Image: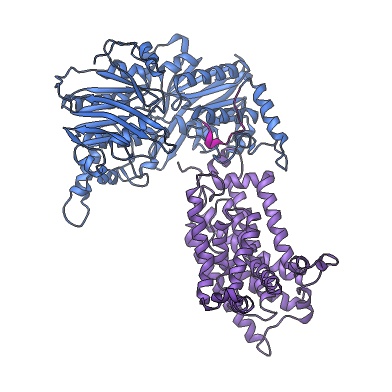
Chain colours: A purple, B blue
Amino acid sequence: MNTIIKFLFAAIKAGVPFLYGTTGEIITQKSGSLNLGVEGMMYMGAFVGFYAGFKTNNIFLALICAFFTGAVAAFVFAFLTVTLQANQNVTGLALTIFGGGFSTFFGEMMIKFTPNGLPKLSEEFIKGLSEFKIPFLSDIPYIGKLLFSHNILVYLSIIVALLCWVYLRFTKYGLHTRSVGENPAAADASGLNVTLIKYLNIMLGGGICGLGGAYVSLVNGGGVWNNGCVNGQGWISVALVIFASWSPAKAIFGSLVFGMFTELQIRANDFAHEFPFLGFLGHIPTAFYKMLPFAITALVLVVTSISQKREGNQPAACGINYYREER
Amino acid sequence: MSMTSTAIELKGIRKVFGNVVANDQVDLSVRKGEILALLGENGSGKTTLMNMLSGIYQPDGGTIKVNGKVVHISSPEDSKKFGIGMIHQHFKLVELFSGIDNVLLGSSKQEFFLRKKRINTVNQAVKDFGLSVDLSKKVYDMSVSEKQSVEIIKVLFNGAKILILDEPTAVLTPQETQVLFDILRKMRDNGCAIVIITHKLNEVLEISDRVTILRKGKSIATVTTSETTAEELTELMVGHAVKLEIERPEVEVEDSPLFSVHHLVVENEDKINIIDDISFDLRRGEILGVAGVAGSGQKELCESIAGLQKVKRGAILYEKENIVDKKPMDIIKLGISMSFIPEDRLGMGLSASMGIRDNMLLKNYRKSKGLFVDRKKATETANEIVNKYDISAPDIVTPVSRLSGGNVQKVLLGREIEAKPNVIITAYPVRGLDINSSYVVYNALNASKKMGAGVLFIGEDLDVMLELCDRIMVLCHGKITGVVDAKTTTKEKLGLLMTGVKEVANSDD
């Protein structure tokens, strides 16, 4: 039992960067923009968040800086695709490449200019982001350990996802956003400011991706900077958008599932050890577990395309630039 | 008439796209409590003009007055503010939303949270307008006329006092058109100013109080409907007198059929027989009309002949050869051509991002020898079609998506007819075409008929079919309810057959 709880606990943690990235990308796609720059925005958020934390020792400021950086990167994407009508796929890929380079370049500089060549967050800072127990709730057997003894950013990711879900589904502005993603000409004819709505949602989405980056560099890195910290998690987040069928609420579940796959890579041997009947898990190469999220995503794509339901699909105008005078 | 009763006044409006002058020196005025018809051929600038009122385009010259004040309409938002509501030809609705949410989209009456009571608010408003439509359905589940009702309710809900409708009847059945006209009359009596863009003369005469005619982007005249005739309007619109009868040349018809369908059955996705055991012959040198309420199996019939639809049972014989299960390419090689103009008039048969020339190429590139594409022949064909069908396009390489709807359609029909096929299947070829263009199409079909081709003409306008076709076959729920001689039958008999009353008319079988 303990192994399972430990595994699930780790899976939740591993799923958090995905949840930030996915939520951000869902908001972006719901407004009709396919921003493939999640990986890049996460990298930029990761570096700037880390650097701010490293210099100021203030968690709140580090998060704000990471969010702001993601939003600025997304603003560039919005300017290129919405205002200048550049191709979204190309722009997103460029952003991914740029973000990776940005974080490596400045990360390397930060290492150079740190006296011992090892930029590390202060103990106090790390402690602020460490796991803590919620009084009473964390005393519930199993559940308490599993759900109520995480670090603050885990809870924040779920709150952000739920808020985004409410925003998209139950508010007027969410309705506006969805209409722009489905049919910008209809939104425009209804007197909505399509350009403004796209900019705001792309930037909000980018900011949330930036938070995901901050989680990776501040929490997963154990307080030490690592140039390649995001390492493909942005791409998995993009795949997860499909898995979650464009719902931030389902993304919470989806990121747990994807987190489990990630953890399986590390813990397959533990399982094999603990439960003899799962012995085969130890013989599967880790590459297989790395591949799983993508295989599952492909499967979900097949299933959703077979079902005739119109809901839960990619927004109709996603990836297509809107130009009012075009017919 | 006092000044205040004028809802919209346009003076000297000019709009230029690149080097094409879409509107020039257009004057127009609409009074409150009046229906003004805006009449003009395809590409005469009707839609462009109205798009300037709805904020999609900005004029390059001239003034717009709304309720007597000069205004500048720079966005659809502005347009809404001035009480102008436009119902576009291609509906601007979010398919995934319910009718309710579409109506509320962008409305100031929508609260921050989407609550259940918003449904009542909208339904109450619908009742107050004196309409009855179920708006709780998702738009993708709605029929075309329901979607149009959503659009109308939407602009009324936003308090529009000036309604602009862009070819609202192009996609409606005659009955639905009457319902729409009743709504418009009601709105007029409530003091709304209504502009209706159309090129159907009988509708203009029926619904409008005054008519403004546009020709080649200029406003030619404004006449009072009760003092004019169809002939006068046509002459103003086209610029010269046009005779309104359609020719029906007599051609020696061979007895043996060129093309025949035997006990054809086609199933749709829900395993329902959308075409239910139909048999008919098409002879050389005749135009066989196919009448029927929309959705009676016309589309499936066309597609099964063209090899695009799986046939469950039955045979389609061309020169005694069964073409069922042949590949579309082989069917085309036999000289069978199909052109289907769907309701939205775009989307089928042409590649929107290619020019006229390259679209010609799509049909004949296989004939050119060697590895490389030969554009010389396609250029010739393209120029020929542009001249013959009077297509207004900047040049033959501009993407066809930039042409007006009617011109796009002429490109498709021209390409299909000029390939000189032996069997022409054409569905709704004059849908949305103006008078001049329609006659070009009729003449082209008659020319093919004289050359011995068999034409299957799937149409919606019974008046046209009665004049153009030799025989008319009526479809109802996938069955043939009768085949009648077009020279002797009447519109009423056809109407009865369309609703499923069998064999009341004189059959020539």
Q: Is residue B164 left or right of residue B493?
A: right
Quadrant containing the N terminus of chain B is top right
Tell me which residue sits at (72%, 80%) in the image. Answer: A121
Q: Which residues are magenta?
A: B132-142
In the rendered image, is residue B129 in sight? yes
Position of residue B321 measured from the top left corner of the image (x, y, whole percent):
18, 36
Q: Quadrant of residue B500?
A: top left
Quadrant containing the C terminus of chain B is top left
Q: B435 or B359: which is nearer to us? A: B359
**Does residue B135 belong to the magenta stretch?**
yes
Position of residue A15 measured from the top left corner of the image (x, y, whole percent):
64, 67
In this figure, what is the number of numbered marks?
0
Q: Is residue B491 left or right of residue B281?
A: right
Position of residue A190 measured from the top left corner of the image (x, y, whole percent):
60, 38
Which residue ends up furthest to the right in the rendered image?
A136
Which residue ends up furthest to the bottom in the rendered image?
A116
Which residue ends up furthest to the front in the rendered image?
A277
In the figure, B362 relative to A300: above or below?
above
Position of residue B339 measured from the top left corner of the image (x, y, whole percent):
30, 34
Q: Is residue B468 left or right of residue B81?
A: left
Q: B362 or A55: which is nearer to us? A: B362
**Does residue A222 belong to the magenta stretch?**
no
In the figure, B40 relative to B490: above or below?
below
In the rendered image, is residue B92 in sight? no
Specify the principal SS of the magenta part. loop
Q: Is residue B94 left or right of residue B368?
A: right
In the figure, B333 relative to B189: above or below?
below
Q: Quadrant of residue A55?
A: bottom right
